[in-house]
Image (tube, grey):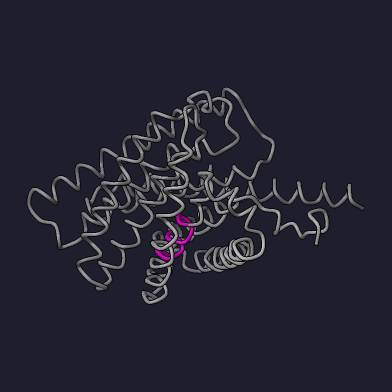
Amino acid sequence: MNRQDAPWWAELPPAAGGAVMATAIISIGLHLTGHATLSGMWLALAVLLWLLLAGDFAWRLVANRARWSGEADTPAALTAVAATTVLGTRLCALGRPEVAAALLALAAVIWPGLLMAVVRHWHRRMPGAAFLVCVATQGLAVLAATLSLAGAGDWLGRAALAALVLGLFLYGEALVRFDFREVSTGAGDQWIGGGAPAISALAAAKLTGSPLWTGAAHTALRTTMLVLLAVNLGACAVLLAAEVRSPRPRYDIRRWSTVFPLGMTAVAALSASAVTGNAWLHTLGVVVLWAALAAWLLVLAGFARGRAHLAGRSG
């Protein structure tokens, strides 16, 4: 099969993993706010998308190694890890810890190789996808902490803390390489810079709620969570202002990386509210969740229009 005859799903770039991340985090947010039916619908779609992209990932690894190798060292390749961990977190909440554990194991296996490949090719003036080194690592922290809270073992909670610290270090490394001009010109993945503190805050929230950490350790985790959430909200405010000042209405697959940070901000706020008792954080989370859902629908509509346009041209 040549490239022109290949189905559209076989031509998706690694950034398509952002669609799984966005869909799964919306499902988590809907679950946390009591919308079980909607959450189940978004979960089913996330599973289907993950299976589609996982199959394509495996096919390229076996049958198209040249393309796989060319894409594996790009930051967007780490969406494979992040998407797997976010989906696993939702499945654990569904009462399927064994499936979540299997997804954690899979993500942990592919994470080091992809991370090292990406870091070896880091350079100055990187796009927002550079922050995926943090997001993927914090995804491991969130899922490990979630499984630990579900009774899968205290060692997972300790591993989650180590991943949280490493993820914060990687965020700093990505930040000094980020091209800040992307805030005004980026096609959507610049929002990952705002979403990375949100998933870090979520990891800290999970650990704050764990009985493993008491006293000074608990206080430090709680403070870290709130600081990260504040950084997240500040970054999102700047990114939103830049979108208003310099609108970019055209569809780009990297727009799924705009939806994910919004959804993650909502989930982080809802989780922080649960461990601190602050009602205003819950209200904030609900408001941002519906904004994220609206953004998800807008990006889906953009994708559908793009496919319809291509179909019309080919017809």
* Prevalent SS, magenta region: helix
Image: 41 above or below 278: below
Rendered residue at 34%/52% (across/down): 270
* In magenta segment, residue 139: no
Quarter of the image for the N terminus: give it: bottom right
Position of 2 with respect to 74 (left or right) is right
**Nearest to the observer: residue 243 or residue 78:** 78
* In magenta segment, residue 82: yes
Image: 212 above or below 286: below
How far from the left and from the top, in percent, is residue 163?
29, 52
Q: Give the range drawn in magenta.
A: 81-90
How far from the left and from the top, in percent, is residue 48?
60, 67
Rendered residue at 69%/49% (across/down): 301
Quadrant in which residue 288 is drawn: top left
Position of 263 with respect to 60 (left or right) is left
Rendered residue at 50%/40% (across/down): 129
